[in-house]
Image (spheres, rainbow, N blue to C red):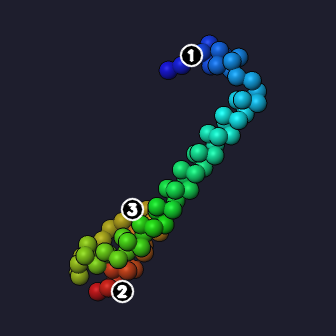
Amino acid sequence: MASLTSFHTIDEKLSTTDLEKSVLRFKTKVLEEVDDIISEFDEITPQINQSAAKHINNNEIIIVFGNSYTIANLLIEARKQK
């Protein structure tokens, strides 16, 4: 773990504009990665729903905890496929 003195030293070495540029690049990269993760979730939900019927059999009781859009769609698709 870095100490406060090491952060202070880093801060002294960087000018304000260099620090601001670094923070901006970091924020941009984080937002790009978050967008990629969201995109992956959007792509995987239809794939999960397509295989729903394989995982759920007739006369089974399914108990879920909480509220999930993905699980709700999986159950609806499984019902449509049966």
Can you see residue 67?
no
Residue indicated by mark 2: 80
Q: Within 10 angstroms of label 1, few (less than 14), some, or many (20 or more) residues? A: few
Q: Amino acid at mark 2?
A: Lys
Image location of residue 55, percent across then percent down: 26, 72
Image location of residue 1, percent across then percent down: 50, 20
Who's the residue at 72% across and 33% down the image? 20
Q: Within 10 angstroms of label 2, few (less than 14), some, or many (20 or more) residues? A: few
Q: Amino acid at mark 1?
A: Ser
Residue indicated by mark 1: 3
Image location of residue 71, percent across then percent down: 40, 69
Q: Is residue 42 shown left or right of residue 63?
A: right
Who's the residue at 51% across and 62% down the image? 39
Residue indicated by mark 3: 65
Q: Is residue 24 above or below residue 73?
A: above
> Mark 2 or mark 3: which is in front?
2
Secondary structure found at label 1: loop
Q: CA distance from mark 1 to mark 2?
A: 58 Å
Q: Earlier in the sequence, mark 3 or mark 1?
A: 1
Q: CA distance from mark 2 to mark 3?
A: 22 Å
Can you see residue 27?
yes
Determine contact: label 1, label 2, CB under 8 Å.
Answer: no
Q: Amino acid at mark 3?
A: Phe
